[in-house]
Amino acid sequence: MAFIECENVVKKFGSFTALDHINLNIPQGGIFGFLGPNGAGKTTLIRIINRIILPTEGKVHFNNKELTLSDIENIGYLPEERGLYKKMKVGEQALYLARLKGMSKSDATKELMKWFQKFGIQPWWNKKVEELSKGMAQKVQFITTVLHKPQLLILDEPFSGFDPINVNLIRDEILRLKSEGCTIILSTHNMESVEELCDEIALINKAKLIVSGNVDEIRKQYGHNRVEVCFRPYESTPDSMLEKQEGLFSVVATEKVKNYYKGILDIENQTASKDLLNNIANQVDIISYQPLMPKMNEIFIKLVKESGGAVSQSMDDYNNSKKQ
């Protein structure tokens, strides 16, 4: 059963269509990636799910019922554009944001102290936000997003601006929240994060849903038929290398690694694994053989190009054109 269901969601701003009949199911308790080029419609859909804006057509269901304003207390949203009041003290602002999510002052203070200690920012409680570094401010905003233990957590580029140590810190917290049953929507351009963290993804381009589903299944579906073979030449033929075999495979690359070689092969679609391995074994001594899964970055570029390239007009372009 879907935890979040988008049913024929359309969003128009005047003549500009930001979302075009999006149908999407987000399962409970996993990490769901929102992918797409800039201006594709990801942030618009996130804002609809978070009820910042309403759809022009269609519905969003939250936990098996139509999404209402009261559900927002069960959602945590970290936007890409961070927003803290620069003149307020850090602790005062964190308490204020926690109270907006329905927490009592005593509960919020108790939980904030735990988080500030975990993230090593206790000394900044009485500092003004404007005194914080960008990374420090992002830590504070992450804390205020997750503090009330939301059922749904929406993170838009959560690793932006962090050094590698703090990226690992935030990543570990995201995985911990998932293990505790939180459903997480992750919007990012970092495909390595998608492969590492996401269970399922949706790719949006030019306001349309291009593909959605399990990450590993999508990698298999859109991948090339490519394998990696580690091998050594036979002692009887020490100079032998893997060579292209018409109708079976071609050799993409070969490199020496310590005392053996690694070859990348493109396999003809109709080649059976048995025939392939027999042919390779006739040429060289096989150490290992494994199919190569394509990277999400390759699939992202491939699908965006096939769907007509990157979006040609963003909302900013549209708004600027209306001002002229």
Image (tube, grey):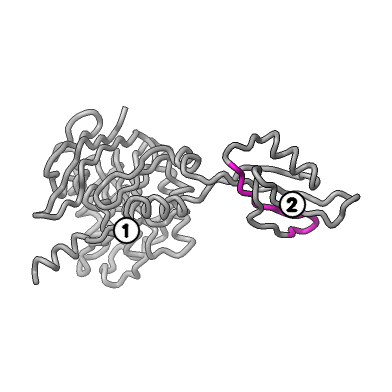
Nearer to us in this view, 186 or 291: 291
Within-10-Å neighbours for mark 1: few <14, some 14–19, many 20+: some
For this view, does 258 lie left or right of residue 205? right
Determine the secondary structure under disc 1: loop
Q: Measuring 35% from the left and 56% from the top, which residue is drawn there?
A: 157
> In what quadrant of the picture does the C terminus appear?
bottom left
Q: Measuring 36% from the left and 65% from the top, which residue is drawn there?
A: 136
Please give the range of residues in magenta: 256-268
Viewer can see residue 118: no
Kind of residue at disc 2: Leu
Determine the secondary structure under disc 2: loop
Q: Measuring 28% from the left and 65% from the top, which residue is drawn there?
A: 126
**Residue 123 counted in the magenta span:** no
- Looking at the rendered image, the disc whose residue lies closer to the viewer, 1 or 2, is 2
For this view, does 146 lie left or right of residue 200? left
Provide residue 150's location: percent of width, then percent of height. Answer: 29, 41
Residue 253: quarter of image: bottom right
Q: Earlier in the sequence, mark 1 or mark 2?
A: 2
Nearer to us in this view, 203 or 281: 281
Q: Main secondary structure of the magenta part?
A: strand
Provide residue 186's location: percent of width, then percent of height. Answer: 35, 48
**Residue 260 counted in the magenta span:** yes
202 vs 3: above or below: below
Q: Which residue is mark 1?
A: 310
Within-10-Å neighbours for mark 2: few <14, some 14–19, many 20+: many
Q: Mark 1–mark 2 contact, CB under 8 Å? A: no
Q: Which residue is mark 2?
A: 242
> In what quadrant of the picture does the N terminus appear?
top left
Provide residue 56's location: percent of width, then percent of height. Answer: 11, 44
